Image: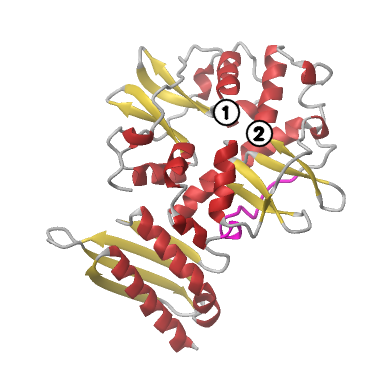
Amino acid sequence: MNEISVSKIMTRKVVTVSENTPIAKAMMLMDTKGIKELPVVDNKRYIGTVIYYDFVSNAQVNQNEKISRFIRRVPILSPKDAIDKAIKLMVDSGISGLPVVDETHVVGILSDYDIFKLLINNHIFDNFKVSNVIIKRFPILRPEDTIKKAADLAAINKVDNIPVLDNFGKMVGEVALNDIFRFVYSQRTGKKGKKDADRGEISETKVSDIMRKDTSPTVVTLNLRRALENLISKKSKAAVVVDVDGRPLGILSRIKILSFLRGRDIGDQIKIDISGDFSFDSTMLLKAEIDRREKIFADVGKFSEIRFYIKRIRGQITSRYEMTANVFGKKRYNVKIEGVGEENVIREMIEKLESIAEKVR
């Protein structure tokens, strides 16, 4: 991943706006182009970005107001940056579409969609299930809730799909942020389509009027790569995940999967943090090895958290690495391994941790 630069996969045709662009026009561009982030330029010089969550959550804003107060300073990428850096910035910022700036000019935009198109055929995803990655704390709606409540929940929780449940807790539909966005846009501009003609204000209209009833939620036991393929093929940011009885268990989102790739939230029992000079393949290898041994580490070794750090030893002809693991739990352990090649060091580290866990028994 470090050998692939942002310029290789970024989208070069970038839709931009100026700080004097009316909110209604910015929303129209987002709706018609299917984009979530708009770079803002002044005389072709990049000055910031506006994000769709901010518009949706401000239902009372004047459609003729300029976008200037919604401009954010988000992380930017250089065309020469590696994809690993892009993933880190997206995860740390929570923003899945970052402008690519050459000096002061926007030359592209890189989204999580672009990254996943590159990674989708990596079979290491087959080692994981959807249950490894889902967001388990998520908002819910009832059919009688208002669209304003749905918009507020989406903006606060930064989710793109919210399940709608009946009184028995069973999913009867879902509200997608795109549908909320489109409705809010129609209210602010007065450009209502046939579906919007008889609807009231956002604070009055019910969720049942816009929710999708013919949804195909993701099953919790589904292979992660298959689930990701479904998201990419539909160009969806997220999907509701259900059990075999159709009850929602969580949300699968692309930004959450990126976070997973960075080493966060690997399993249910152990908190994992991975940092340093890890390549994408090595990160996934480490995660797969931990996932297979999580019960041993958690139930036998009583590990509650492991922090991994790896650095490449400079000045060596061969690729030597030093890897440390700080283990927290019933006891605390500090482990250091040094060797040739990331894979060898990772496997040696896992064997060492497994040995420690077995001794606790």
Give residue 237's position: percent from left, percent from top: 58, 39
> CA gap, disc 2 to disc 1?
9 Å
For disc 1, the marked residue is 52
Start-end of magenta stretch: 129-140
The residue at the point 50 percent across, 79 percent down is 330
For disc 2, the marked residue is 177
Main SS of residues in magenta = loop
Q: Which mark is residue 156?
A: none
Give residue 182's position: percent from left, percent from top: 68, 24
Q: Nearer the viewer, residue 153 or 80?
A: 80
> Under tag 2, what secondary structure?
helix
Q: Is residue 25 magenta?
A: no
Q: Is residue 99 visible?
A: yes
Give residue 65's position: percent from left, percent from top: 58, 13
Dot 1: few (<14), some (14–19), or many (≥20) neighbours within 10 Å? many
Tell me if residue 95 comes above or below residue 33 in the rendering. Answer: below
- Name the residue type under label 2: Leu
The residue at the point 82 percent across, 26 percent down is 204
Q: Is residue 137 magenta?
A: yes
Give residue 125's position: percent from left, percent from top: 49, 56
Tell me where residue 236 sits by quadrant: top right
Tell me if residue 340 comes above or below residue 55 in the rendering. Answer: below
Q: Nearer the viewer, residue 196 or 121?
A: 121
Dot 2: few (<14), some (14–19), or many (≥20) neighbours within 10 Å? many
The residue at the point 64 percent across, 60 percent down is 221
Tell me if residue 198 comes above or below residue 219 in the rendering. Answer: above
Say whether marks 2 and 1 touch (CB < 8 Å): yes
- 2 or 1: tag closer to the N-terminus: 1
From the viewer's perspective, is 273 left or right of 57?
left
- Name the residue type under label 1: Tyr
> Under tag 1, what secondary structure?
helix
